[in-house]
Image: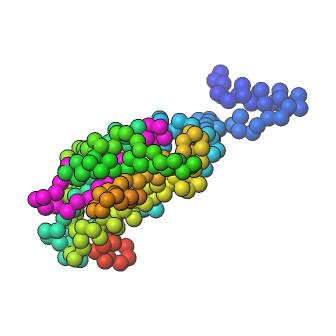
Amino acid sequence: MSIHPMSSRRKRLEVLRAAGRPVRRSSVTDSPISSSNDHRRWLPRRRPDSETGADTKSERKGQRPGRCAARPPWIGAGLDLLRPAIGWHHKALQNRLDPIASVQVGILSCDGLGALANSAGLAINKVSTIAINDHDTLHERARVLGGDRYGSIWIDRDGREHHDPGYSDWRVNTFPDMPALPRDNPVRVRLRTLDVRLPIGVTHAAFDKALTEALSSARIDLWAKAPGGQAWCIERRIDPGRFVRYSDVWIGGIRPTRFPVQELIRIMPRLQTNLLIAVVEEVVLRLAGWQGPAPQ
């Protein structure tokens, strides 16, 4: 005689009820099909990456169940990642793109920034842009950043100024191998750069400013001043001032001019290239003056 796989559990239920013991209804079910999926309701639910931004073990370390106040910055926040691909092949869009004017977007890093990232359990890098010409490259930009020790200065909660080492060796990171984008897409993925066609009449400076604004959700300086960043730093006993960086640049005079650093963001070059491309596409679409949903 075949025995229903749940019969022994039902017998235990009857014994417990007869003894007046409380029984959780979900512990016993009459349906073998529903019982196979019942365990999922009792597994600890991991918050989605869009909420916690956890991508690596180091970033997930210290996350406590039920607590979501401590949140890392997230690239592309507010971007509809489920939308269909933009139809760049439409003439209405192609006619708005300059056939010549282009910029390059790259992700740069240095040893000092790597040490800061490791202490916080975050992936922190710098996004830079340059106009494509014969006189400037991202490698040259990295050399200039190293000469200025870009981002090496921070001020602690007591007002003391710190100059961290490791900010004189900036380098350009590589992008991962990935399928080629459609031929009409304004973005081309190279080994170390994203080559981007600009809309007609848009300058490199305008694109750089728009991209910085579009990446603001991932900027560590803004994040460190927000409640989520403050809670993240408190959990790890890190001074939030370490993420608000400055640079002294000589532009004339007897003293250097101090500038706030606004291009350090949380991004993993090998894992979040698609997110960066999506943000760049949205910037190009907006600068092209396109109103409403993008053509598909």
For image coordinates 32% across by 47% down, the residue present is 149
Based on the picture, tell me whether residue 272 belongs to the magenta stretch: no
For image coordinates 63% across by 45% down, the residue present is 67
Q: Measured along the vertical axis of the image, is residue 246 above or below residue 210? A: above
Q: Residue furthest top?
A: 1
Q: Nearer the viewer, residue 173 or 113?
A: 113
Q: Along the horizontal axis of the image, is 84 left or right of 240?
A: left
Q: Along the horizontal axis of the image, is 54 left or right of 263?
A: right
* Residue span colored magenta: 116-139
Q: Residue furthest left?
A: 134
For image coordinates 19% across by 51% down, the residue present is 140
Q: The C terminus lies in which quarter of the figure?
A: bottom left
Q: Nearer the viewer, residue 73 or 25?
A: 73
| Residue 295 in sight in this render | no
Specify the quadrant of the image occupied by residue 216: bottom left
Based on the picture, tell me whether residue 121 belongs to the magenta stretch: yes
How far from the left and from the top, in percent, is residue 144?
24, 51
How far from the left and from the top, in percent, is residue 208?
30, 64
Specify the quadrant of the image occupied by residue 232: top right
How far from the left and from the top, in percent, is residue 65?
62, 41
| Residue 14 in sight in this render | yes
How far from the left and from the top, in percent, is residue 268?
36, 45
Q: Measured along the vertical axis of the image, is residue 267 above or below residue 15? A: below
Q: Residue furthest front?
A: 254
Q: The N terminus lies in which quarter of the figure?
A: top right
For image coordinates 61% across by 37% down, the residue present is 43
Q: Nearer the viewer, residue 160 or 222?
A: 160
Structure colour scheme: rainbow
In the rendered picture of this protein, how many numbered marks are placed on residues? 0
